[in-house]
């Protein structure tokens, strides 16, 4: 269902010839073959500058991030909590449009093989044109895309076009998703399935998530091979370990943005972000 | 036979009006919207629910609202005869209450105990706070900081009614940002909370549901025009922000090709100034707040700030059904500037003793533009969607020179 990835970690997976979808699933299966969990890090692209993002991504990949989500700022981010909203406001003026963003992706792609996933709201993609965007995105080396306001019932064309262009359409699943929707999400999502830990926006405390174990079990019972990553509300190494134990990977965003924002200068911000990713990595790799 | 005969069957099962509408929300809200849709579809045809709704519309809201023949004003314009549908005489002073009553009744059937709403001019906020008070439900109204400043009396009214008014400072601090914040609240509180959307906008089933609750405006108008003139009106005029008062008036007549319709958007300081809210006249198709429709946006798909002197029209989107009615040519969408709307409020106040809301004044101004060229047997219905008391501060700032005692009499009579 989700494109063939014949195991092997990212480094050995024949990077130059594989599609984004394969690279993305390879990042998860690579960790899985080591008996470990994948770490997905979210950054708001262009916060505080595009050059900062380009410098930071290879560093956090070295520190243990398996996948990097790069947010494209939107004027009306209804899915985001206050921290990511503020980051988006700072980043907005650095992009005149998605072409600027893809130019940034192309530069990062030259520096690191880490899978890169776009996260933004649907309107900028709709305005650009779905197919035109996916073609440009594949050329730039983007591996996947997450559109939180494009639910599975509206995403039939999008998911088919994305797969055809080798870009993984990552769909979201929520605590109140019913069985019929879960099945459609499993069918259409590629790269990974983004399981939203709780009802709310980004940056809320995850706790144990809402019925996470049961929801993971439901996907397993459907026989999906697509990796399951959990996001929203995970910021401490302890939370990452606790939630990671239930699924294939965890997604962390607000926590790293807080550390970047608190640093006095860009050098310190990069060090703080790298240290944080290393802490998360170490917690995930600890034996249970 | 008419190509418009199918319009009464829209939207389709997934909430599409032609290419517009739909349900573009986070996965968490999809479930709540499915649930709401199922309950709404069941209750829509439930005679008990309808009877309860009709009873409260009659005895609490004060319906039917009068259809008033504005003879002096018509004569002054010297053309078509104009009738005013007096939604300003409803309890709470606007058409908004028809919809909030219906939605809060639904909320109760769904077992929700907490109500949230967004508001621009404050009329929808007041109407929601009113019905929440009536049924004893907790109510939080999200309102942009800029609107709180220019609509202070409505903020006070909501608090008097026991609601919390939550200030929204993000973005342009107006209606669209209030809606963003309401959606963020809802995604976290969806188990016990009902979101009362104030217009024919938002994700399916809101555009269809709000139309259904507002349709009473057009149903009464049809009956009243038949009684008073023996035939259907020739032209309907209503202002369009999100477009609920217009949809409420138009819905009953969509399949009647002899009834022409004009939706009046806010041209603000003029379309060429870039400071306006004329979404259909000057926008492009996009997705915002859960549905696909015309939007004010830049080339990159970022939403642009709207502008209008009237807070209720100050929104960069429009209900998806209006976009469809525009594309197929069923409704003509035009625009009126801030200055024309202000002038229209004074005209109607002095000729008919009726102070219209600045929103409704856009429709009044359009009638002033088209009526003189039409023959006297031609009839126009203008939806007077709300009363203007809330706008006095805005009017005092916009046109201080017009708040003088009448020049000749000087007998202490109030100027406005």
Image: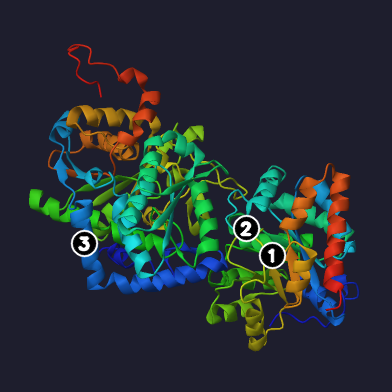
Packing grade of label 1 (10 A; few <14, some 14-19, many >=20) is many
Disc 3, SS: helix
Vertical arrangement, residue B46 with respect to residue B383, above or below: below
Could you tell me which chain the residue with mark 2 belongs to?
A
Vertical arrangement, residue B259 with respect to residue B9, above or below: above
Disc 2, SS: helix
Spatial CA span between label 2 and label 1 = 10 Å
Mark 2 vs mark 1: which is more N-terminal?
A: 2
Q: Position of residue A249 (x, y in %)?
A: 76, 73
Q: Are marks 2 and 1 in contact (CB under 8 Å)?
A: yes
Q: Are marks 3 and 1 on the same chain?
A: no
Depth check, mark 3 against mark 1: the one in front is: 3
Spatial CA span between label 3 and label 1 = 48 Å
Q: Position of residue B382 (x, y in %)?
A: 24, 43
- Give the side of residue B325 with respect to residue B77, left or right: right
Which residue carries the number 2 mark?
Answer: A125
The residue under the point 49% across, 37% down is: B146
Q: Position of residue B284 (x, y in %)?
A: 51, 50
Which residue carries the number 3 mark?
Answer: B54
Q: Are marks 2 and 3 on the same chain?
A: no
Depth check, mark 2 against mark 3: the one in front is: 3
**Is residue A264 among the parts visible in the rendering?**
yes
């Amino acid at each position: 269902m989700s494109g063939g990835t014949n195991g092997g970690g990212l480094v050995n997976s024949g990077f130059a010839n594989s599609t984004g979808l394969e690279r993305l699933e390879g990042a998860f299966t690579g960790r899985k073959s080591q008996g470990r969990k994948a770490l997905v890090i979210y950054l708001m692209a262009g916060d505080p500058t595009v050059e900062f993002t380009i410098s930071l991504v290879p560093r956090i990949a070295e520190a243990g991030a398996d996948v990097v989500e790069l947010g494209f700022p939107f004027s009306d981010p209804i899915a985001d909590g206050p921290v990511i909203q503020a980051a988006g406001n700072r980043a907005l003026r650095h992009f005149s449009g998605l072409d600027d963003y893809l130019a940034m992706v192309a530069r990062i792609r030259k520096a690191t093989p880490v899978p890169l996933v776009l996260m933004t709201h649907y309107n900028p993609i709709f305005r650009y044109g779905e197919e035109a965007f996916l073609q440009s995105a594949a050329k730039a080396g983007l591996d996947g895309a997450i559109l939180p306001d494009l639910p599975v019932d509206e995403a039939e064309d999008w998911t088919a076009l994305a797969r055809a262009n080798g870009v993984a359409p990552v769909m979201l699943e929520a605590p109140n998703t019913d069985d019929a929707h879960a099945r459609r999400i499993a069918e259409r999502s590629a790269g990974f399935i983004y399981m939203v830990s709780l009802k709310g926006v980004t940056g809320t405390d995850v706790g144990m998530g809402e019925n996470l174990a049961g929801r993971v079990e439901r996907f397993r019972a459907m026989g999906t091979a697509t990796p399951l990553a959990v996001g929203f509300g995970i910021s401490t190494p302890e939370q990452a370990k606790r939630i990671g134990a239930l699924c294939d990977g965890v997604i962390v965003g607000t926590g790293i943005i807080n550390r970047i924002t608190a640093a006095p200068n860009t050098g310190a911000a990069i060090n703080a972000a790298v240290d944080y990713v290393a802490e998360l990595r170490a917690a995930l790799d600890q034996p249970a | 036979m008419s190509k418009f005969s199918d319009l009464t069957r829209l939207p389709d099962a997934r909430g599409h009006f032609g290419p517009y509408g739909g349900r573009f929300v986070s996965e968490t809200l999809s479930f709540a919207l499915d649930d709401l849709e199922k309950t709404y579809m069941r209750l829509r045809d439930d005679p008990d629910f309808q009877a309860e709704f009709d009873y409260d519309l009659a005895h609490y809201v004060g319906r039917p609202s009068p259809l008033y023949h504005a003879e002096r004003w018509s004569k002054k314009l010297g053309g078509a005869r104009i009738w005013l549908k007096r939604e300003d005489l409803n309890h709470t002073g606007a058409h908004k209450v028809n919809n909030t009553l219906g939605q809060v009744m639904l909320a109760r059937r769904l077992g929700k105990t907490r109500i949230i709403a967004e508001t621009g001019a404050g009329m929808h906020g007041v109407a929601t706070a009113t019905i929440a008070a009536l049924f004893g439900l907790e109510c939080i109204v999200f309102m942009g900081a800029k609107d709180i400043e220019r609509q202070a009396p409505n903020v006070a009214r909501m608090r008097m009614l026991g609601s919390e008014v939550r200030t929204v400072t993000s973005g342009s601090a107006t209606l669209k940002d209030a809606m963003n914040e309401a959606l963020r609240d809802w995604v976290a509180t969806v188990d016990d909370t009902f979101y009362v959307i104030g217009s024919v906008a938002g994700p399916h089933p809101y555009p269809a549901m709000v139309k259904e609750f507002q349709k009473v405006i057009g149903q009464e108008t049809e009956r009243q025009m038949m009684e008073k003139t023996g035939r259907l009106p020739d032209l309907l005029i209503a202002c369009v922000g999100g477009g609920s008062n217009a949809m409420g008036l138009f819905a009953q007549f969509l399949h009647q090709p002899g009834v022409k319709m004009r939706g009046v958007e806010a041209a603000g300081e003029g379309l060429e100034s870039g400071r306006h809210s004329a979404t259909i006249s000057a926008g492009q198709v996009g997705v915002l707040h859960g549905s696909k429709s015309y939007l004010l946006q830049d080339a990159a798909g970022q939403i642009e700030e709207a502008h209008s002197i009237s807070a209720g029209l100050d929104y960069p989107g429009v209900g998806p059904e209006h976009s469809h009615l525009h594309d197929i040519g069923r409704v003509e969408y035009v625009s009126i500037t801030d200055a024309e709307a202000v002038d229209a409020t004074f005209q109607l106040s002095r000729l008919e003793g009726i102070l219209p809301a600045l929103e409704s004044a856009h429709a009044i101004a359009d009638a002033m533009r088209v009526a003189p060229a039409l023959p006297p047997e031609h009839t126009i219905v203008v939806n007077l969607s709300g009363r203007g008391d809330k706008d006095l501060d805005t009017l005092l700032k916009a046109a201080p020179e017009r708040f003088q005692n009448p020049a000749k009499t000087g007998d202490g009579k109030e100027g406005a």
